[in-house]
Image (cartoon, rainbow, N blue to C red):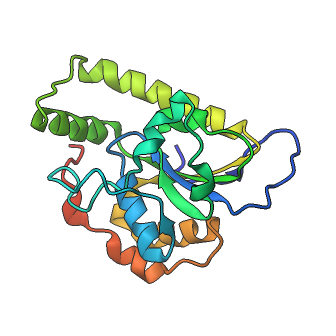
Amino acid sequence: MKSWFNRRAKSAPHTASLSPTIVVVSGLPRSGTSMMMKMLEAGGLSVLSDGERQADTDNPQGYYEFERVKQLDKGDVAWLPSARGKVVKIISALLEHLPPGYDYKVLFMERRMSEVLASQQKMLKRRGEPSHVDDETLARLLAKHVQHVKSWLTSQPHFAVMTVDYNHMLADPEPYVRRVNQFLGGQLNEQAMNAVVDPTLYRNRAP
């Protein structure tokens, strides 16, 4: 799998919106989405976040969430105008509920599945919510989900997508930061973005 790609989704021609693009950071939970949000904030993008979910042991740098995003599957899209020209975090399972009428640039975070599962299990254990699905089954289901979402994204005319390999970016952030900046228009502060990458937060490594 390529560590990143930058492409315009394939579909019928369409007229680009005159409104500023909505930048979306997405991926599975525990795939590095919060770190990317912090990087983009440091780089100069305005973040759409309500701060309701506070930083904790699992995410000491903060979650950067906007609670109304979680209602996308219930039809709550009235907040989208306020996301124009900003970046918002939306988990992969909700991307298909984003309506047409806007242009979206999606940074899709990918991380080794074993690390995603380990991080999720630790978080659930701390909350007293043990998983009832074994890791092998869950890994298969999540991989299938990611494949489906990425396939769907390529068919949407109003989405542009770049995937970011979390593991590779931690090891060597500068090339990724440069490509992210280019993907988003080239106006971000790359030095500030690079400074956000903190390998000490990489706690659930694959063996």
Task: Tell me what residue is drawn at x 79 percent, y 56 percent.
Answer: 17
Q: Position of residue 171 (x, y in %)?
A: 34, 64
Side of 167 where 134 appears, left or right: left
Q: Report the side of 146 relative to 101 (left or right).
A: left
**Which of the pair 24/164 is nearer the observer?**
24
Where does the C terminus fall, quadrant-wise?
A: top left
Question: Considering depth in this image, is 66 or 136 the residue closer to the camera?
Answer: 66
How far across and how far down the image is residue 60, in percent?
A: 20, 59
Judging depth in this view, the residue of 164 and 89 nearest the camera is 89
Q: Is residue 207 above or below residue 151?
A: below
Count of numbered circles in the view: 0
Front residue of 60/107: it is 60
Q: Is residue 73 above or below residue 83?
A: above
Image x and y of residue 136, in percent: 29, 21
Compared with residue 18, is residue 150 higher up or lower down, i.e. above or below? above
Q: Position of residue 196 (x, y in %)?
A: 33, 72
Query: For this view, does 81 lie left or right of residue 166?
Result: right
**Residue drawn where x is 62% and y is 60% of the image:** 84
Identify the residue at image location x=27%, y=59%.
62
At a point 54% along the width and 53% down the height, the residue shown is 24
| Quarter where residue 105 is shown | bottom right
Residue 154 seen from this side: yes
